[in-house]
Amino acid sequence: ASCTSSNGPAVILHGSEGAVSVHVEIARTREQLSRGLMWRTELADDAGMLFVFGDLAPRTFWMKNTPLPLDILFLDDAGTVVNVAAATTPYSEAPIRSAAPARYVLEVNAGFAAKHGIGPGARVELPAEAVSTTDK
């Protein structure tokens, strides 16, 4: 499976290089949150996956079964980046942790955050679909 189209909901990230949009698949069910981008072999430059959790809490991810190197951006309730795990290692089972509690996690291609000047404190505008419901 791949995520190569530029359609669907978008997040807008405000980095030091200006605003950039990323079209996202939204992961919100337990199965979607667990699978993430595992087994994906392609991801368009302007595509990603937005993980939506029902609460603000410390988050831990890994790259098991994920062949693509990714930047993992951890976001708080307000959509502010708390930290970026840059250029994660494909297939690694090492834990990747948020530096502070996070409600949202955005996965994009490795190098995206650096290219667009996105780091801690950057503001991210989330699509209505991501913030309009609370999951239990």
Image (cartoon, grey):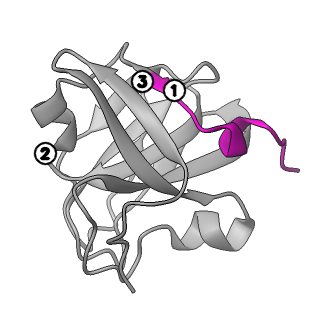
The location of residue 91, given as percent across then percent down, is: 26, 74
Checking the image for residue 81, the label placed there is: 3
Labelled pair 3, 2 in contact (Cβ < 8 Å): no
Residue type at tag 1: Glu
The location of residue 37, given as percent across then percent down, is: 42, 70
The question of residue 135 being in magenta is answered with yes
Cα gap from disc 1 to disc 2, whole angstroms? 20 Å
Which stretch did the figure color magenta? Answer: 124-136
Please report the residue visible at 32 percent of the width from the left and 59 percent of the height from the top.
94
Q: Nearer the viewer, residue 12 or 89?
A: 12
Checking the image for residue 125, the label placed there is: 1
Give the labeled residue for mark 2.
111
Give the tally of numbered discs. Answer: 3
Outermost residue, right direction?
A: 136
Q: Is residue 19 above or below residue 47?
A: above
As helix, strand or loop, the secondary structure at mark 2 comes to loop
